Amino acid sequence: MATNEPGGGRPDEFAELRARLSAVEAREAREATSPPRRHRTRSAFAVLLVLLACVLTPLSVVAVWTRSQITDTDRYVATMAPLATDPAVRTAVTDRVTDEIVKQIPVDSLLSSVAPADRPLLNTLLGGIGQALTDGIAGFVHDQVQRVVASDAFATIWADVNRQAHAAVEKMLTGQGGGAVAIKNDTVVLDLAPLIDRVKARLVDNGLSIAARIPEVHTQYTLVQSDAIPKVRTGFRLLDLAGFWLPVLTAACAVGGVLLAVRRRRAVVTVALGMAGGALLLGIALSVFRALYLDRLASGVDLAAAQAVYDTLVRYLRSAVRVVVALGVLVALGAWIGGRGRWAGTTRGMWASGLGAVRRAAERAGLRLGPVGRFVHRWKAWLGWAAVAVAALAFLLWSYPTVLVTLCLALALVAALAVLEFLDEPGGGPAGAR
């Protein structure tokens, strides 16, 4: 019968379908185990760009820090400001200024105001108490210097010296510039002449009139001392020349590596964690260099003051390291949550279920989203990416973002995405169902 012919042909059709399915599965298996040459080439370039981004990250952080210290006077003054209140630095400055002033006030200068007939008697008297008198004058000068250094006037003087001599950091990092800072014998020194002038006036006001005879004294306070300064300066000079473009190149390598990758979400996680790791290595290097630098200081250098100076000079660099590490971890976490993994899917499901339950509870209480809910449902993906773009733009436009700023922007982004999820009303909700 004709009706049996089709039925009789079904086994052959099933066999043909099974053969085609087996061929497709075999081809997919071959592609999975041996990807096309085009994919292998793309992956190789992607890996190269990702590695470049990770290697260039610490150099970019140092370049941005160097450029900010050289081109931004307020930034440099803010960097140096804490030293004015550091106890170790105050003590070191007090001792240095006291020694210099006492050198300019010899005890013999007291004889100039004594009548000639009385000088032999005074010389005999000074022969017995000369050292005590010298010590007394030194103690008096030290007390006056200490009061000036402990006052608000010292913070003002310190800020003014660094503001007027902003070439300090340029001199230290690039070997160029001038002003109150100079490099002598691998030592970066700061001129404290304004502080000595203030102390001279205070000494005269407090009865030590001979202090008015002290000439202009340019006392040098050591900021950094190391035989590695010439080598470090060369590296900083190169980074300063790179300036703005090195961070741009780093970002371009990261973006290019992600775009060329076959699995882009995994590439985002990799490059984010890799750049965070590069910044972390820079932080470790700063700590190692600190120990090496302090160990190689001369025996007469105040170790506590040297530690304070080093930590103050690199504190914004360390802050930048923490920002890059935090940003890398946040980006990697966001990319992972958006992936296809089981735990990532579970996390997204809990997020959607929790906010969906809140929305339904609000609807039962009388909330009606109407067109807003339908609009958000239709354009939620685009709105979400817009929120990400706004957060990224805010981070880029922030002058000097900190870890707190980074976390606040991340929380603001999470809040925006939560609002979108709450407003997402598939099918118009109860009102649309009616």
Image: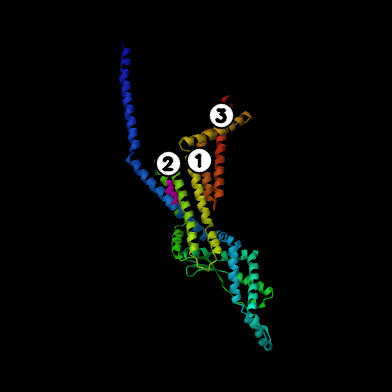
Q: Amino acid at mark 2?
A: Arg
Q: Nearer the viewer, mark 1 or mark 2?
A: 2
Q: Quadrant of the N terminus?
A: top left
Label whose residue precedes the other's in the sequence (1 or 2)? 2
Residue at numbered disc 2: 264
- Kind of residue at badge 3: Gly
Q: Earlier in the sequence, mark 3 or mark 2?
A: 2
Q: Find residue 190 and report its image quarter.
A: bottom right
Mark 1 touches mark 2? (CB < 8 Å)? no
Q: Nearer the viewer, residue 427 or 28?
A: 28
Secondary structure under the numbered disc 2 in the rendered image = helix
Relative image position of residue 312 (x, y in whole percent): 55, 59
Q: Nearer the viewer, residue 282 or 42?
A: 282
The residue most toward the top is: 1
Q: Is residue 274 above or below residue 92?
A: above
Q: To which quarter of the image does residue 128 belong?
A: bottom right
Lateral position of residue 108 relative to residue 25, left or right: right
- Mark 3 crowd level (few <14, some 14–19, many ≥20, 10 Å Cα): some
Which quarter of the rendering shows the C terminus?
A: top right
Relative to residue 309, is residue 39 drawn left or right? left
Amino acid type of the residue that numbered disc 1 sits on in the rendered structure? Trp
Residue linked to disc 1 = 385
Q: Which residues are magenta?
A: 248-255
Q: How many marks?
A: 3
Q: Residue furthest bottom?
A: 117
Residue at the image position 58 percent from the left and 64 percent from the top: 89
Q: Which mark is residue 428?
A: 3
- Closest to the observer, 165 or 266: 266
